[in-house]
Each structure stands twice: as structure tokens, then as C-alpha cells.
Image (cartoon, rainbow, N blue to C red):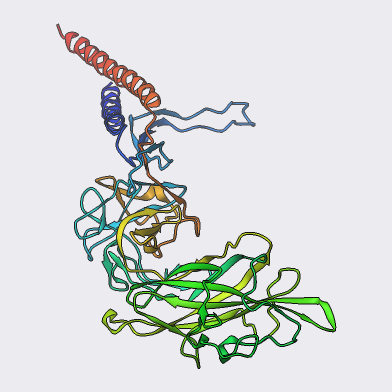
Amino acid sequence: MMMSMFASVSGLKAHQIRMDVIGNNIANVNTIGFKGARATFQEIFAQTLSSGGAPDTMTGRGGTNPMQIGLGMNVDAISTDMGRGSVQRTESPTDLSIEGEGFFIVRSGNEGAYSFTRAGNFTIDKAGNLVTSTGKNVYGWMKYTYGENGYEFDTQEPIRPINLYEDIYNTNKRIIAAKATTEAILSGNLDATRPAIFGTTDETEPVDITDGFLADGTASTAGDGIPDVDGQNVNPHFIVPINVYDDLGNEYKINLKFWKTYVYDDPDDPATRMTQWYYLVEPANGASASVSGEDFACGYLCFDSKGRIVTTDNNFPTTKDIMLTPVPESGAGPFIFRLDMTQLSQYADDSSVKPTRVDGYAPGTLVTFSIGDDGVITGVYDNGRQQPLGLIALAIFENPAGLEKVGANEFRQTTNSGDFKLPNKPRTNGAGSLVPGTLEMSNVDLAGQFTEMIITQRGFQANSRVLTTTDELLQELANIKR
């Protein structure tokens, strides 16, 4: 009879533990990144009153089953449900959730053991560190190199606390350094209906006005690179403004001027009519422009009778290296950029030449940043440029349910979870992708927890009835003496 009391007591204790688990699940129904738990029971070893017997074919006696009385039950396991919780959109740039497998890697300072979390409610502290709500650093990579496909982070480097303002590889990331212009690519049309300054000639070789002579052989004042007719400078047909930068980020406005100079035919083949345009690079800001071997930057372009620019004649190069020499007060030295005009055309339409690509830029200050689904943190600067600031790393475990909860929505590895060896980039090696501007909520199913609570209540209630009934039986036994 005492065994029934002990069995009911074990049932009460086990159901109490299960209720504790349910209560904790319900308490954390709105906790970010929380993973619910489940308590399961198992039977305690039973007392054997008699063992089973096999049938006896000689005597015809049948077999008997063993006779056993259970000694109660206890908690079999309290397992963690590592399923993904629902996602809540917050629009905060530092809030992150993980779509798929993986955990954020966090640690307090540069020493100690790593912790792992699915709660991505991060913030930026005063020093620029990406941290959890408890001040732990979020880890990843910050060393990268530029390649043909853009920048690539060196994930072979050890992970470090992510800092958006500075690191040992990129120093001050609040300011992006200036970059000198190296190329200026133009495209568009030059109006074919414009009159030629020096008219039409049937000579096979056009006269180069920079040699100091005009089409009629008279002397010219064009040594300064400006077309001249009878001693009068001629206004350009079209002007293209271009902004370029030196190594210090000083900006220079350049006016690229175009004049239509010659239309000439080959006497033996009039179908090969060609049109020549003269251009001049004229900088402002007191700077001077030149090309190798010349004191100023100018040249000629040639178009065929179908409006296509001629690229096969070395006398009419479509690209030219321009050297710009800033004034001494700028503090910058000369720099060279390539002027590319291979995409120009000449049709009977308005002139529309404009720069389609001019690299180089002034220095910029960090304004904001964004985090991509690949974990890359990209800084946006007030000069319109962007620069990577870091890459968030994820940890993968063979058995995530084997991780141990340590509070603050964090886990640590155990002997059954698998070791944290190498961090992973999001979307690689089984790691999930990041969803910026969202948070993973608790994966607790409230309806399921209420159902479990009712079942647990019934179990606890039934065990308490066994206990009171056994007590009454023992009372009756004690009353036999009366």
C-alpha cells in the first residue's frame, strides 16, 4: 500500500516540474528568440513479484506472464524546441532574424567563452560596436579586398567584434577617403547639321590647325588650342561639363568644347566623305590640362558618312590621357585620367554628348548603413559612395537542441551540441540568410501550452487523489485495532 503513496508522490513531483516548464514557456511567449521546452515522463523501475514462465509441452501447462508493480515515474527529459519562431517586422536597421540554421556569435569583450543567440535585437554603442541588449559584442569579419566581382571578405581571418567606426584593418571608417579620377567616358551625339568652321576640302589629308595654319594656309593663332578664323576666336558648337577629382578630393570643373572643323572627300571615292571635329579640354579652378608632349589638351575626332566615329585612324584617337595639374595651393599633385569618346556619334540631331561614367570622388562622412541578407554591413556616405563595414558571422551546430540555455536569450555549447569550430558566412555551408529589419519571436505555441497545462493539471489532480485515497486506506487500517 505504501508503494501507491510513493508512486503518487513521484507523479506529483513530475507533474509539478512539467507545470514549471509550461509556466516558463507561457511567461516567455513574447520573448525575442526564445525557444520553448517540453517535459516528458518515463516509468521508474518496477518491482517484480514473479517472473514469467514458459509453457510446458510435456505436462501441457501454459505459460505465465511476469507480475510487476511499478514504483512510480519521473521526468524523462526536458528538451528544447529549436524550431523557428514567427517573424516580427521592426524596420530598425540593426534588428536581424535568421531564415534557416545558425546562431549569432556574441561574447563579452575579447576574452571568455562565446555565447550564441537567435535574438537579433542589436544596437550600436557610442564607440561604434554592434552589441546585444546586454552589451555583448557581436562577432564577424572586417578585413576585405577588392576583386573583379567587387569586395570579398577574408573569412579565413579570426572573427572579431564588429565595429562600424574603426578597426585594425580599415582604421577610421567614419570617413571614406577621396579617390582621384582615372577615367571619363562620354556618349551621345554631335549635331551633323552644324556648319564647319573651315568649310569643305577635297584634300585627302585635313590641315591640323594646331600646327599654326588654317585651311587656306594662312597663319593661325590657334596655338592656345582655340580654333581661329581670320584672327577671330570661334565659339564652340557644344560644351560638355565634367567634374573630376584629385587625390585629396578637390573637385575640378572641366569644360570639354567641340568645334566642327572640316568636311572633306576623297577625290577618288566621294562616298567616303569624312567629318572632322576639334575638341579642347579647358579646366577651371586655376588648374591646367595637358597631354603628353603638348602644353594643352586638345585633339580631333573623325566621323564617317554614316555618322560612326572612326577608331581605326591613329590621327584621330578616340581616347586620350589628360594630365590635370592643380594649383599649388590645393596641396595635390598632378593626376592623369583617360578621356574616352569612342561612344560618340554624328547624326542630324541635337548635340547630346554627356559623361556616362566619371570615377573618382571627394571624401565622405558616414551617414547611415544597411545590412544585407548575406550579412554584409554597408556604410552609406554623404558623397554618395558606399563601403563595406563588416560581415556578420553565424555558428552552426550538429545538434542545436543540445545547447544549454544561459539566460539573456543566449546558449552555450555542450558536449552533446557539437563544438563551435569555424564560423560561417550567411547563406553558406548550411547557414541561413539574414532578414534585416525583423526579429524572430518566441516559438511557443500558446494554444498548445494551454492544452498541455490542462493535461498536466488533470495528471496532478489524479495523483493527489491517489495520495488521499491511500491515506484513507491507511487510516482504515489503523482503525482495525479499535
- Picture coordinates of residue 382 (x, y %)? 33, 59
Indicate the quadrant where residue 379 lies: bottom left
- Picture coordinates of residue 290 (x, y %)? 46, 85
Indicate the quadrant where residue 448 lies: top left
Please determine whether, in this image, residue 408 is positioned above or below residue 417. above
Q: Kindly give the residue lying farthest to the right in the view shown.
A: 268
For the residue pair 172 and 454, the one nearer the viewer reads as 172
Kindly identify the residue that appears in the image at 29 percent across and 17 percent down: 461
Kindly identify the residue that appears in the image at 33 percent across and 73 percent down: 250
Left/right of residue 114 with respect to residue 155 in the rendered view: left
Q: Kindly give the residue lying farthest to the front in the view shown.
A: 230
- Picture coordinates of residue 367 (x, y %)? 30, 56
Please determine whether, in this image, residue 197 is positioned above or below residue 423. below
Q: Kindly give the residue lying farthest to the top in the view shown.
A: 482
For the residue pair 338 and 405, the one nearer the viewer reads as 338
Kindly identify the residue that appears in the image at 26 percent across and 63 percent down: 165
For the residue pair 353 and 373, the one nearer the viewer reads as 353
Please determine whether, in this image, residue 393 is positioned above or below residue 120. below
User: Which part of the image, by quadrant, shows the N terminus?
Assistant: top left
- Picture coordinates of residue 350 (x, y %)? 61, 59
The answer to whether residue 148 is seen in the rendering is: no
Q: Kindly give the residue lying farthest to the left in the view shown.
A: 482
Indicate the quadrant where residue 88 lies: top left
The answer to whether residue 31 is seen in the rendering is: yes
Please determine whether, in this image, residue 104 is positioned above or below residue 206. above
Kindly identify the residue that appears in the image at 14 percent across and 6 percent down: 482
